[in-house]
Image (cartoon, rainbow, N blue to C red):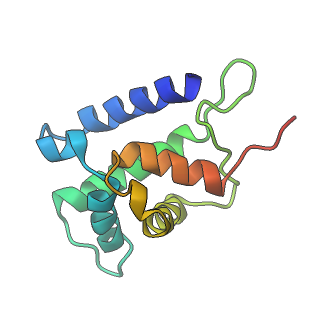
């Protein structure tokens, strides 16, 4: 339940951070992955979609270092210290390619799912 509420809050935050557009509010993982592939090229184009990918993953990167009062990460994954936001983009791209059955889901949910799979937290 906590993860679902968190994903909803992050999704709303990511949507509000970008200019209002229907594409932002309901963009699928497949749609955003196309823009993220452009982001990881040598010279990424300066488009809204590339900016959406950049903003989403820099936000997830920043929030992945935040813990609550009990020192529990607020995101349901534990990013290793040497991982950069572009590494997280690559994880998302691999996830979307490996899971075409969920590619039409909301991109923020699939991004978190990809990162949970790639960077699980160790039980204490």
- In this view, the residue in front, 15 or 59, is 15
Residue 106 x %, y %: 33, 45
Q: Quadrant of the C terminus?
A: top right
Instruction: Report which quarter residue 54 is drawn in.
Output: bottom left
Instruction: Report which quarter residue 81 is drawn in.
Output: bottom right
**Seen in the image, is 90 located left or right of residue 24?**
right
- In this view, the residue in front, 121 or 64, is 121
Residue 34 x %, y %: 29, 68
**Seen in the image, is 85 located left or right of residue 82?**
left
Residue situated furthest bottom in the rendering? 42
Please tell me which residue is depicted at 35% across the width and 81% down the height of the picture: 42
Q: Quadrant of the N terminus?
A: top right
Please tell me which residue is depicted at 26% across the width and 56% down the height of the picture: 51
Residue 25, relative to residue 1: is it above or below?
below
Residue situated furthest front in the rendering? 101
Residue 62 x %, y %: 51, 43
Residue 33 x %, y %: 34, 63
Callout count: 0
Please tell me which residue is depicted at 16% across the width and 47% down the height of the picture: 23
- In this view, the residue in front, 4 or 68, is 4
Please tell me which residue is depicted at 66% across the width and 29% down the height of the picture: 67
């Amino acid at each position: 339940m906590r993860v679902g509420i968190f994903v909803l809050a992050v999704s709303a935050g990511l949507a509000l951070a970008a200019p209002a557009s229907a594409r932002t509010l309901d963009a699928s993982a497949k749609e955003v992955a196309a823009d993220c592939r452009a982001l990881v090229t040598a010279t990424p184009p300066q488009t809204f979609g590339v900016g959406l990918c950049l903003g989403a993953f820099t936000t997830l990167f920043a929030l992945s270092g935040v813990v609550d009062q009990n020192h529990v990460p607020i995101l349901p994954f534990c990013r290793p210290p040497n991982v950069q936001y572009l590494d997280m983009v690559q994880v998302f791209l691999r996830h979307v390619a490996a899971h075409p059955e969920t590619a039409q889901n909301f991109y923020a949910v699939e991004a978190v799912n990809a990162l949970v799979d790639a960077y699980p937290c160790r039980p204490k």
